[in-house]
């Protein structure tokens, strides 16, 4: 059975997209204390809310998720690598390309990696039992805190962000 379209979620997504763009503009151009405050406010809620909405609309279909998300990730990972190489070369006055690490997402691409990981994890957390859902949410919060406060967590496959944001995604999914 298809869910009826809920336009409040469309409005929420539009506001969150605006917040993402505004936050990134502020991070690049805002150099005032007021801009810092606005930046911190935006970044305290916009990604948890985005992942909640992503979970709400999620259906377990890893083939479809990988077919749509993986090509985007690969394309933009390569584009950002080339872009950074060009900018570094211009700054250095000679060709300067750094190492390419496909499994370390550049800048905002962690979100696509996280969505793919969440699709793989959904069968583990799939249940209609409310008690199990609460237990899984608690487990996700504990895992997120453990991984989030581990200083040795690097950016390989955005695993720190995957676990830190997993509770919000599951909350939306349930």
Image: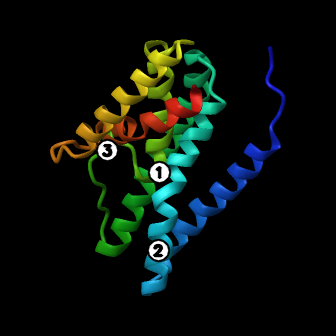
Q: Nearer the viewer, residue 120 or 15?
A: 15
Name the quadrant containing residue 166.
top left
* Cα distance between the residues tagged 1 and 2: 14 Å
* Residue at image coords 50%, 47%: 48
Residue 100, disc: 3
Q: Earlier in the sequence, mark 1 or mark 3?
A: 3
Q: Nearer the viewer, mark 2 or mark 3?
A: 2
Quadrant location, the C terminus: top right
| Picture layout, residue 174 above or below residue 90 | above
Where is residue 160 drawn, in percent x and y? Answer: 31, 40
- Callout 1 crowding tier (Cα within 10 Å): few <14, some 14–19, many ≥20: few
Q: Which mark is residue 28?
A: 2
Asked if the residue at tag 2 contacts the one at tag 1, i.e. Cβ–Cβ closer than 8 Å, the answer is: no
**Residue under numbered circle 1:** 108
Q: CA distance from mark 1 to mark 3?
A: 16 Å
Q: How many C-alpha atoms fall within 10 Å of the one at disc 3: few (<14), some, or many (≥20)?
A: few
Disc sitting over residue 157 in the figure: none
The image position of residue 3, as x and y in percent, is 79, 24
Give the mark nearer the N terminus: 1 vs 2. 2
Q: Is residue 162 left or right of residue 29?
A: left
First in sequence: mark 2 or mark 3? 2
User: Residue drawn at (47%, 61%), measured in percent from left and top?
Assistant: 43
Name the quarter where the N terminus is drawn.
top right
Indicate which label's residue lies in the foreground, 1 or 3. Answer: 1
Left or right for 1, reference 58: right
Asked whether, in this view, residue 144 is left or right of residue 28, the answer is left
Q: Position of residue 158 (x, y in %)?
A: 35, 39
């Amino acid at each position: 059975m298809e869910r009826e379209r809920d336009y409040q979620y469309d409005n929420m997504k539009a506001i969150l997209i605006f917040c993402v763009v505004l936050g990134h503009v502020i991070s690049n151009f805002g150099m005032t204390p007021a801009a810092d405050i606005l930046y911190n406010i935006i970044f305290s809620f916009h990604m948890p809310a985005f992942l909640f909405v992503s979970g709400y609309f999620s259906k377990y279909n890893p083939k479809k998720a990988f077919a749509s998300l993986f090509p985007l990730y690969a394309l933009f990972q390569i584009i950002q690598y080339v872009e950074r190489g060009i900018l570094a070369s211009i700054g250095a006055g000679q060709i300067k390309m750094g190492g390419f690490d496909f499994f370390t997402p550049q800048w905002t691409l962690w979100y696509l990696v996280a969505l793919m990981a969440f699709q793989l994890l959904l069968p583990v957390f799939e249940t209609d039992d409310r008690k199990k859902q609460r237990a899984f949410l608690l487990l996700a919060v504990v895992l997120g805190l453990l991984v989030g406060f581990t200083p040795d967590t690097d950016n390989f496959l955005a695993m720190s962000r995957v676990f830190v944001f997993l509770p919000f995604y599951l909350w939306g999914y349930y």
